[in-house]
Amino acid sequence: MPFIHVSEMGHERAYEIKDAINDVGRSEANAVFLKDIDVSRKHCQIVREGAAWVLRDLNSRNGVYVNGVKVANHPLRDGDVIHIAKAVLTFREARPDSGTRRGAKTTVKKIGELCVERGILSQNDLLAALEIQKQTRQKLGEIVTTRGLVPPDKFIETLSEQLNTPWIDLEKYDLAKDTLALFPRSKALLWCAIPVFYFRETKKLVVAMTDPGNFQFIQEMEFYTYCNIEVMLAAREDILKAIQKHYPATEPEDELSRNALLETVRVGIPKGEEKGEEESEDRAISKLVHLILEEAIRAEASDVHI
């Protein structure tokens, strides 16, 4: 299956080209999402025409360049380099065996086998843990660490080796408030992840998470923060402790933001409407819109259609 390799703001990622028409641009709904402000929301398309793939510019403001030449409609070949604003895209007819994202598996050995090889888990304990896994569908790491078969730090070290992803001991770091503010407590719990380091110039955000292979969560983080996400591995217990330590449970940051938005909506209601005065048609519509916005904020809706 063809894919597009994207290099943008010091970060690299890949998108599979699955559909007959694949939009490219700054909208998060696109098949290929770019973050550069000079990219149009729908900048261009990659379209299947028979057995070939064609790049079409959608009358974008800054144009599209393939191999240094500005194009409007261009048949793509393997290895073509596409420039869109500051983003560099490479078209490939097939994905190579190794992943383009840091954190992809680079070994066929299973984590249980690695634990046995390193002498931190016996073969009998591994077989017993695998039987428990069949019954409970828990992850092997959760089984062997919670039952005391493998020390959590040793398991994380081994998992780090398997995934070729660095691991971090969160207890040794004092996380900055501006970094933690990049996503709220609710998202941290949902993704079981926490922001660790933020590099403002390159918009790179280093995140500690339990499952660096969960590319859906990583993409959600990128969409939410507009940062280039680099992943580090951390134990689930350590991440939950860090969330508890750094995010107030009684008034999470997302709740504060939501309350502020609600107050803004209330302030925006025209005077007299809350006192039962006779409403004109315009005021009635205005009030309805404010009520819809207030309900959307409470429901944490991602978008509102009026």
Image (cartoon, rainbow, N blue to C red):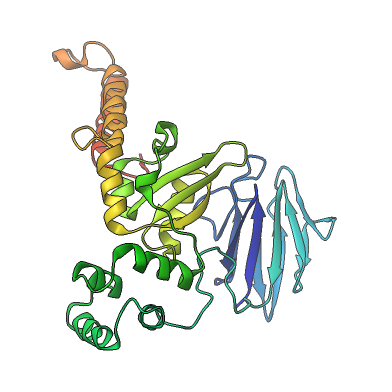
Q: Is residue 44 visible?
A: no
Q: Up-down: is 67 above or below 60?
A: below
Instruction: Find residue 79 and report its horizontal and vertical position in percent.
Output: 76, 70
In the rendered image of this protein, does residue 235 appear above or below residue 184?
A: below
Residue lying at 60% horizontally and 67% vertically, measured from the top left: 100
Residue 235 spot, x, y in % from top left: 33, 59
Q: In the rendered image, which quarter is residue 147 located in? A: bottom left
Left or right relative to 48: residue 19: left
User: At x 26% / y 18%, what residue is drawn?
Assistant: 280
Q: Position of residue 213 (x, y in %)?
A: 44, 66
Q: How far from the left and from the top, in percent, is residue 21?
A: 59, 66
Residue in the picture at 59% in, 75% down: 98
Vertical side of 75 occupied by 170: above or below: above
Viewer-closest of 93 and 76: 93
Left or right: where 93 falls relative to 102: right
- Position of 204 compared to 54: left or right? left
Q: Nearer the viewer, residue 121 or 93?
A: 121
